[in-house]
Amino acid sequence: MRTQLYFFTFVAVLLGLSSAKLAAQEEVTYINPRTVNESGGPFSGAVLAGNTLYISGTLGLDADGEVPAAVDVEARNVLNNIRAQLQAAGMTMDDLVLVQVYCSDVAFYDTFNEVYRTYFSAEFPARAFLGSGTLLREARFEVMGIAVDH
């Protein structure tokens, strides 16, 4: 009797996981897919799975595709790009739960933070600030994140 109970519980859990996985697969939306992202690279700008948005790494280039001369302008550009991905999914910067910042030189940490803190009206998300060395196009920053629609 006890073995049957365990078996049925196991099957119920498997069925529940399978249906949850199928439901999650049905709810995937690609934001700025690879055919239109700024770099032409093989990735989407963001992927919305259920209520979670996974934002690809983005740079803070100017409209001409160049790295701005000023560090704070580049930081603002990259965060504006993150905000645009969030807005495309109906979210805001305050929906971010995790941010990863890759930086070519950690000497830019303070300047980045001065700009970064102005983008949030609530609590800050969890974050990593990583010294990465050379970034694509000689950028100073590449930022990616995860947001959850509350």
Image: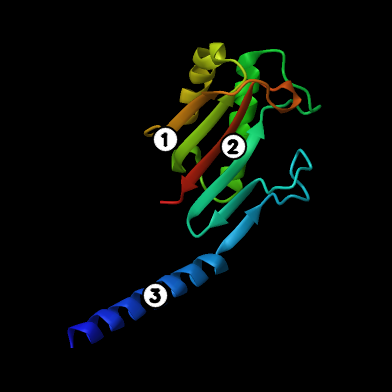
Q: Residue at x 42, y 35 (%)?
A: 125
Q: Residue furthest front?
A: 3
Dot 1 amino acid type? Pro
Say what secondary structure mark 1 lies in. loop
> Badges 1 and 2: C-beta atoms under 8 Å apart?
no
Q: Give residue 87's quadrant in the image.
A: top right
Q: Quadrant of residue 108?
A: top right
The residue tagged 2 is 82
Q: What x and y, as percent, mark residue 1?
A: 18, 88
**What residue is shown with label 1?**
125
Kind of residue at badge 3: Leu
Instruction: List x then y, in percent, for residue 96.
Output: 46, 40
Give the CA separation, mark 2 to mark 3.
37 Å
Q: CA distance from mark 1 to mark 3?
A: 33 Å
Q: Earlier in the sequence, mark 1 or mark 2?
A: 2
Q: Which residue is mark 3?
A: 14
State the residue in front, 40 or 95: 40
**Direction left: furthest residue:** 1
Q: Nearer the viewer, residue 11 or 145?
A: 11
Report crowding for label 1: few under 14, some 14 to 19, many 20 or more residues within 10 A (C-alpha): some
Question: Which mark sits nearer the N-terminus, 1 or 3?
Answer: 3
Q: Earlier in the sequence, mark 2 or mark 3?
A: 3
Tag 3 secondary structure: helix
**Point 57% across, 51% down: residue:** 89
Q: Residue at x 58, y 44 (%)?
A: 55
